[in-house]
Amino acid sequence: MISAAIIAALEAIVGKRGIRDADALRPIHPGFDSRNLDAGLMVIPKSTAEVAGVLCLCNEHGIAVVPQGGRTGLAGGATSTAGEIILSLANLNRIETISPDAQVAIVESGVTLQALQEAAEHHGLSSGIDIAARGSATIGGMISTNAGGMEAFRLGVMRQRVLGLEVVLPDGSVMSDMAQVTKSNEGYDLKQLFIGAEGTLGIVTRAVLKLAPKDEFTATALVACPSVAAAVTLFGRLQRSRSIRVLRAEFMERSYFRLAAETLGPPALAAFTDASAYLILESEAPDQHTAQTSLEEALAAAVEDELILDAIIAQSESDRQLIWKVREESDTATRAYPAGYWFDISVPLQALQAYLDRFSAEITALGDGTRGFVFGHLGDGNLHICVASDGTMPDKNAAKAIVYVGLKEMGGSFSAEHGIGLDKKAELEALVDPVKLSVMRTIKKALDPNGIMNPEKIIG
Amino acid sequence: MISAAIIAALEAIVGKRGIRDADALRPIHPGFDSRNLDAGLMVIPKSTAEVAGVLCLCNEHGIAVVPQGGRTGLAGGATSTAGEIILSLANLNRIETISPDAQVAIVESGVTLQALQEAAEHHGLSSGIDIAARGSATIGGMISTNAGGMEAFRLGVMRQRVLGLEVVLPDGSVMSDMAQVTKSNEGYDLKQLFIGAEGTLGIVTRAVLKLAPKDEFTATALVACPSVAAAVTLFGRLQRSRSIRVLRAEFMERSYFRLAAETLGPPALAAFTDASAYLILESEAPDQHTAQTSLEEALAAAVEDELILDAIIAQSESDRQLIWKVREESDTATRAYPAGYWFDISVPLQALQAYLDRFSAEITALGDGTRGFVFGHLGDGNLHICVASDGTMPDKNAAKAIVYVGLKEMGGSFSAEHGIGLDKKAELEALVDPVKLSVMRTIKKALDPNGIMNPEKIIG
């Protein structure tokens, strides 16, 4: 549906090798969402100038553009259809500079998180953010979805990592605000609009990111807690402690842990103490001995205070990997229950126990073996929930109602870290303040009057 | 210039006691900027609904509204003129809730920073941000200017403290996004637009703020460093250290320190070792012994590595206050040189030594005793600079050129933490990407089509 003349014009901008038609796309994996490559035409610019050229052309001709990074998004934010152009940032993949003194990196948006992490580690620094899809997920995609992940309780989500941004606007003009400093108030902070906009307002091409100090050694433990409230109390205590630096505190509720440990784990994990709540705690320290002993001491104190029932402390990297497998291979729930409904919510910590008690009771009451598998990032109260059934799946709206009820009133969120994309538009319309929705439409119309940027996503 | 009918309509919204005319304003201090109360008419609503009512009325009649918090702004962001209405948030001053588990506070926008700090301390928590004007500055004003201050290198600027916001838009509609969680991606993060907008897009009425753990005890030292680069190296080392938790690292360059110590300090401070750079370091710990010894040990190591020449460690609260006085009473420079030009910039840490070397040489070369007094927040590279002269002041544009040259290219900022207001509009026009300026105008027009919100400020 894209004319030969347009393709020729695109070729003039990005070169023959910068364009892939449907045949050339066939060997490429569509990523998490099978709809991602449906447009059948991908343009792969190598520079900001080429991105600008492509958008200028598309804006003039009213051609829709779907930006793609690592295609690891979980909310349908990068799906494409015939007549649209996929714009891949894969070739904007240079790490330009890393300044160890200022703890700052300047990168192009197609750099993967893992590439940045490895480059930062050379300087004893961390990206300050980590997600399981690190090998494929790109910085631009993480900015556009305001990614969160496992370390957000320490250093915030992606928005808090971004000091500066370069964005190509829908008309092809380039907005540059590449500050390398935390304090910069030069009028409206427009870069914030593009963070989390899922490519609907423009295309992120470069970014300045704040890095964080990193210790070389870690210690890891799997912990069984008598209750969710005990896990929350333990987390709060560890966070305030001077003797341990907690990097991660991943939460698994009983049903999920049992399913994952029995499916993925060695017998020792599958037979681990039965409990309402499990945590994977990972701490860091400048040497292995300190890492290990500080974690051991913290856990011993927690046992004494009855905040934990039992713990397994990893004694080797392979122990560590076995523990993490139970949490990171969460698609074990999808494989066991392919028809399950997935949710991605935030619950304020003080309300977590009550929320999960109510949720479990109401989900079970739907009958026919319906139940929830819940895990997530404890420090943020960020829960990933799979509602599944051993029999007939319940009505999806009934499940939604149980997951979402009261969330807004308690200050939580129906959309924590995966974004809205196509898949959560109904929730957005139903649960967000209508005044905010109306301003969102005003902004979209003002910045992308021809509606070419990632149409239909979020509020399209 | 506001008609009696309008005043009657305002009275119907906020009551007689919610309105002050020129006579009633006379006893009120205008705050930092003598122009602040020039409108001669102040409206003081007590609730979001009253703010909404006032904006709705003013929008209908095209009456300009200048929102005011503590009137401590330094860039002319709250000045008013006849025919405008001052909208004071002073009576929206309730701290609604503090949740210790989640480390979250919900406040109205007229709450002062100090009131929040005191309430948070009851729970062993900190506001995570501190500025010298804490007694008067309001949370709404700090949000609207995206305040920074002394602790921003640890936990970020005000933008990073805000989890949720309620804003009254120019047409009187109320946009509510009062999330209490770090992870919330419910479409465009519109609250970010109002953070740092200096009241030109709407009025912040309530906020959810992230608090931070706080230790009870602090230790404070005044340190003389052989060079700016040594101070930067020392700061980086302290930040990575596990044995000390640095809260503040305030920088004073030689001229400023000498002026302030000789004017304000006791003989011991005035006679303190001559050096290129001084730091006030403050660290915290759960007990006084640890606070004191960890700071002593860190400084001893730094002496050995020739990163510091000399240090005074406060042995009492009165020692501490004497040290801080030298830094916090920075208007000592204004009193000594009332004609001085003030700047508020950020310089990336790796460029700080070179920047200051060049700056000093070029300012001195202007002749007639012209020199710079420089102090600020080391961790952010945030410098407050007073260019003054013992003779005739140099041309202001010559001073500006010396301060601003190269700043953008090195990733710094001409406007770090005080905002644009009226006073830095020329810089904004000259130094910000024209594409960004153009999008700023688009946003202003889209959200405030009648231009009633704080006219002339930033880009008006």
Image (tube, coloured by chain):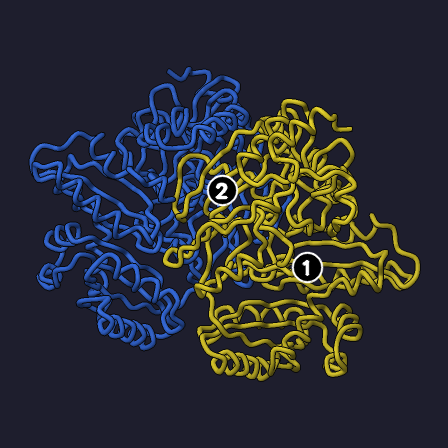
Chain colours: A blue, B yellow
Instruction: Name the kind of residue labelled 1 in the image.
Output: Leu
Residue B329 picture location, percent across and down: 72, 65
Residue position marked by numbered label 2 in the rendering: B165
Q: Residue at x 33, y 29 (%)?
A: A422
Residue position marked by numbered label 1 in the rendering: B383
Residue A166 picture location, percent across and down: 54, 40
The 10 Å Cα crowd at callout 1, few under 14, some 14 to 19, many 20 or more, is many
Tag nearer the camera, 1 or 2 = 2
Q: Residue at x 34, y 56 (%)?
A: A379
Quadrant for the C terminus of chain A, please.
top left
Q: Is residue B183 visible?
A: yes
Q: Is residue A363 above or below residue B64?
A: below
Q: Chain of mark 2?
A: B
Q: Is residue A332 left or right of residue B339?
A: left
Q: Is residue A353 left or right of residue A445?
A: left
Instruction: Name the kind of residue labelled 2 in the image.
Output: Leu
Residue B448 picture location, percent across and down: 61, 28
Q: Is residue A124 visible?
A: no
Mark 2 or mark 1, which is nearer the start of the sequence? Answer: 2
Q: Chain of mark 1?
A: B
Q: Is residue B255 above or below residue A63?
A: below
Q: Is residue B405 left or right of residue A455?
A: right
Quarter of the rendering containing residue B251: bottom right
Q: Which element is circle 1 on?
A: strand
Q: Residue at x 48, y 18 (%)?
A: A62
